[in-house]
Image (cartoon, grey):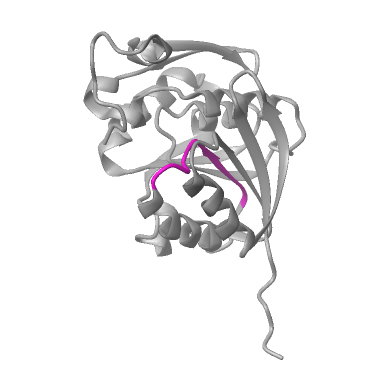
Amino acid sequence: MALVPYVENSLPALSKLHNSSAQFRFANHDLRLAQDWKKLGVAAVVWDAAVVMCMYLELEKVELKGKGAIELGAGTGLVGIVAALLGAKVTITDREPALDFLSANVKANLPPDSQGSAVVSELTWGEGLERYPAGGFDLVLGADIVYLEDTFVPLLQTLEHLCSDSTVVLLACKIRYKRDTDFLSMLKQRFRVEEVYYDKQRDIHLYQAWKLPPQRDL
């Protein structure tokens, strides 16, 4: 469901979201991501948080080559595509209605020799987690996935399932409302969280998190 209703003459700041495609250059590749705000809303446009996440991945502050990564709420797939181009083996996930659109973007933007580096898979947070290996990923990526309060608990459940003590979580987001800081407080109860990057122009915060060891009863 789109947070902002589709309007042809929308606010100028949102006009780029109504374009049928968005073009970028990351990992020495020209990428063209299809967008379809009218059909799929927030799941089918490239948000600034995804762009900032890709910029950060290019800085090579997180090891990607040969690592197993999973992207949550992938939308257009930009972050997962860039992670694959930078050498990760990526599972790119979203809810079922977005999968055909997401798969088409992944196929169109990964060269033939990289097609095996990314798979698209259905994942609704908090549901069917047994289909994914517990603690089975080196890296968990999420760009602009913190905005609906009803999803916070299942999102945390999903992060806890996917992460081992050595898994790195990267979350890129705007801090729009009190509920966003509330989520960070919830996350800090289960994870060690640090802000590692801030893009002032786009007002995007990037957080890195590691799962805390389970507390032992005294």
Q: The magenta stretch spans which residues?
A: 138-148
Residue 65 pos. (x, y %): 70, 36
User: Residue sitting at 56 percent across and 48 percent down?
Assistant: 181
Q: Nearer the viewer, residue 164 or 209?
A: 209
Q: Quadrant of residue 88?
A: top right
User: Residue sitting at 47 percent across and 62 percent down?
Assistant: 157
Quadrant including the N terminus: top left
Q: Quadrant of residue 9?
A: top left
User: Residue sitting at 59 percent across and 57 percent down?
Assistant: 185
Q: Is residue 111 above or below residue 67?
A: above
Residue 167 pos. (x, y %): 66, 54
Does residue 136 appear in the picture of this structure?
no
Residue 141 pos. (x, y %): 56, 41
Q: Is residue 49 above or below residue 195?
A: above
Q: Is residue 141 left or right of residue 177?
A: right
**Is residue 143 a member of the stretch shown in magenta?**
yes
Q: Nearer the viewer, residue 92 or 191?
A: 191
Q: Is residue 173 above or below residue 114?
A: below
Q: Is residue 195 left or right of residue 112?
A: right
Q: Nearer the viewer, residue 140 or 46?
A: 46
Does residue 129 appear in the picture of this structure?
yes
Q: Quadrant of residue 207?
A: top right
Quadrant including the C terminus: bottom right
Q: Is residue 53 left or right of residue 192?
A: left
**Is residue 191 a member of the stretch shown in magenta?**
no
